[in-house]
Amino acid sequence: MAETERRWYDEVEDLTARLVRIDSVSPSVERENACAAEIREALAERGVASRTWSMQADDRKIVWAMVEGEAVAPDAEAVPTVLLLGHLDVAGVQDYGFDLDPFDPEALRQHFLSGGGGEAEGENERVRDAVSGDWMFGRGSFDMKSGVAAQVAVMGALQRGRADLPGNVLMVTTPDEEVESAGLMDALEPLIALRDECGLDLVGVINSDYTAPREPGDDSRYVYRGTIGKLLCCFYVRGCETHVGEAFRGIDANLIAANIVRETNLNPDLCDEADGEITVPPVTQKVRDFKARYDAQTPISAVVHCSCLVHGWTPQDVLVRMVPLARKALSDANRRRVLTWRAYASRQGSTNTLRDLGGGVYTYRQLYEAVAQRLSREGLEKELDERTFGLIGEIRSATASLSATEHDFLVDQACLADLDSRGRSDVIVRTLVDIADRERVLDPAEPTVVVYFAPPFFPPVRGDAESQLSRAIAAEVAEGDYGGVRFRGFYPYVSELSFMRMDDPVYANLPILKANFPLWREGTEEMDEALKQETFRVPCDLIRELDCDVANIGPWGKEAHGRGERVQKPYSFETMPELIRNVIVRLLKDAAGSW
């Protein structure tokens, strides 16, 4: 669609600005529900009725609406239906500081027009974009309120033309995507019920999450027929603590953790390649030790969280690569300790030698099974629950009356109250190591590394180039005037398309994933409802039941989750909604046999 035409532009620009002005940083019931209400209002203004489902853990609303086509064949066994998927929450805004309102697009543009507060290369680019007038700034402008705004506009257009529409279009907009996608996972069951109740044939899912330049200078626009997967690979490091004045008596957990970061971070050997496309290498998302306060002791333990993106690798494939790197990190730390002692001892005139402390690297499953042989599986599970989940309610109710000393003790023990799911995972592993020490499965005098997975988990989806949805997109891109859109395989930034379909290799490898995922709990019927919400799982069987073809047609912009987040208006406000609308119509006609 030529960017000089404006069939959608003003409408999508206005809708995007309306949504950006709402602070919907997740998680927040009040903020996210305010955005949900605005989306419903915008749909109602276009004659589209909407309803909501509620998340299980709280009262955050999942918005859904359906345009029902009136040109459906009367003898159709099921109504061809396209699902438009999006999320209404946004990432945090700490990077804006105190001087900028992240939800005021025009004030942000004026800020960058004036020089953006600095002369860095990125800020110069922001200045150029602000001067052009073709960009809207603000948290959520790009990820992904412009995508939701385009979907609302498309729903309104299809509602007006439903007399000629040979199928339905269902729009679902969720909270919590920026945290753990709990909103979408909670939407799966009512979505399947709606599908079955209304006799819908879900012929394709179009997500409208952001798209961006793949490298510096890349000006291409992208559409994707699959999505990358993500595993958060974690390393719990138990060192051998010592006084800082006796540094060589033990081994610092942070030294081992630093080596793990060095081995994994930006390691090109950890890039997964499939269908001629390659993932970016892993990056570290968190490194910390478990000391609650300053003292002269070296840290007893530390954790590393490493983001691992995959196209076809299974959890087993990731473990096969990560465990040897952890062994190398531990070995290098031991070697450094011995070698530096030699240099230090020489300067002291000492002839004493230092032995390697040894130690071992385990997957969570390996250590769990070793301890279970001593305690029994039931006994170990009971103790883990009592020492982790069982403390949550007690701690939360007692915190207000605790003395400072008691409160510090609880923090130092890293109890689960007020920790997120990654923190809860770390505590479960830490508790397992403590039990393994007690039961002499591990030697407390030796360092230990445990490799495991923590939330979130995004399964990769390998898009089918021959599906009806892919063929409809390819034909529309080839025939339409969309400025040279490129149609590729894997959406590279992680998306909720991961929960619309589960490929066979991923499903077959789930037992290994679950066994090495401490927080993944199934069969929680006997657990207290509040504590059940502290666990994690992906509803894999529901995803398999949906089994939808997927694609991402989203806005184009720069710096998602960054201070300069912005969306390019001509493509995102005009070309993208036109492409979405035309693909929907083409796909429904193909599915109905009327194209």
Image (cartoon, rainbow, N blue to C red):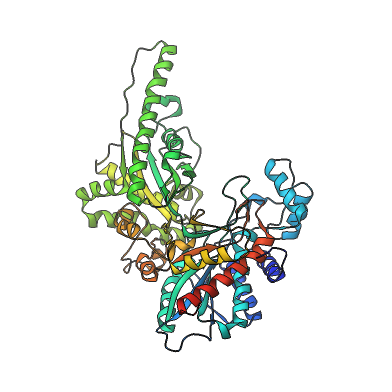
Residue 257 at x, y percent in the picture: 43, 37
Work out which residue is located at the far top of the displayed protein and give it. Answer: 349
Residue 9 at x, y percent in the picture: 70, 68
223 horizontally vs 119: left or right: left
117 horizontally vs 476: left or right: right
432 and 272: which is toward the camera:
272
Q: Is residue 312 above or below residue 244?
A: below
**Numbered circles on residues, count:** 0
Residue 265 at x, y percent in the picture: 47, 40
417 and 430: which is toward the camera:
430
The answer to whether one can see residue 62 in this image is no
Work out which residue is located at the far right of the displayed protein and give it. Answer: 114
- Name the residue rendered at 40%, 80% in the picture: 196
- Name the residue rendered at 24%, 40% in the picture: 440
378 horizontally vs 486: left or right: left
Q: Is residue 272 above or below residue 169?
A: above
- Name the residue rendered at 33%, 17% in the picture: 353
Q: Is residue 535 above or below residue 362?
A: below
Residue 409 at x, y percent in the picture: 44, 47
The answer to whether one can see residue 482 in this image is yes
Q: Which quadrant: the N terminus?
A: bottom right
- Quarter holding residue 290: top left
